[in-house]
Amino acid sequence: MRISLKIDYAVRAMICLAADDTGDPVKADTIARAQDIPLKFLLGILNDLKRARLLRSQRGAEGGYTLAKPGEDISVADVIRAIDGPLANVHDASLNDLTYPAPAGGLVEVWMALRASLREVLEHVNLKELATGELSPDIRALAAKYEGDHRVY
């Protein structure tokens, strides 16, 4: 799985909205400045998120964007799917329909395990957790494991 700049920007924008506890619409340029995201690029991302019904927009001087539902009800996986489609896509085929001739037959199970592990993380981390910094111990443990495995000595 590749985390594109577009996905990174989308998740960061959504975290900004989840962190705003006023309930008032937040202007796109406010999000763009806060997260150092080019405004024109952000507007396209916000439209994608709106089409996916993760955001609402309000026009006018008091307008802007709000989350369509509470931050705890929107996972990182929801945002990624709105921007990029399936979390782990193997040449646009359903994993249940894939078969490979021997000796590569076990590869299908590896792709399934990959998708399951991505879902285990991305579907269980929500915007509120990210906005408040209250990630679960499981997520923190995985991050610490990664950090420990990738230290430069």
Image: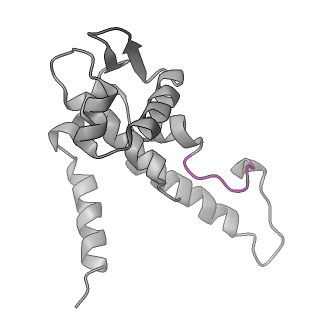
Residue at point 29% right, 62% down?
Answer: 142
Residue extent of the magenta highlight: 87-93
Q: Is residue 78 visible?
A: yes
Q: State yes or no: residue 92 in magenta.
A: yes
Q: Quadrant of residue 73?
A: top left
Residue 44: image location, x then y, percent:
50, 33
Residue at point 27% right, 16% down?
Answer: 25
Residue 99: image location, x then y, percent:
80, 60
Q: How is the image coloured?
A: one colour
Q: Quadrant of residue 28?
A: top left
- How many marks overall? 0
Residue reaching furthest to the right: 101
Specify whether 14 is left or right of 93: left
Residue 131: image location, x then y, percent:
21, 38
Where 119 sits versus 79, above or below? below
Specify whether 93 is left or right of 140: right
Where 88 sits versus 75, above or below? below
Q: State yes or no: residue 6 in magenta.
A: no
Specify whether 149 is left or right of 48: left
Q: Is residue 124 visible?
A: no
Residue at point 15% right, 17% down?
Answer: 22
Residue at point 47% right, 46% down?
Answer: 6
**Which secondary structure class fits the magenta region best?**
loop
Quarter of the image containing the C terminus? bottom left
Where 123 sits versus 27, above or below? below
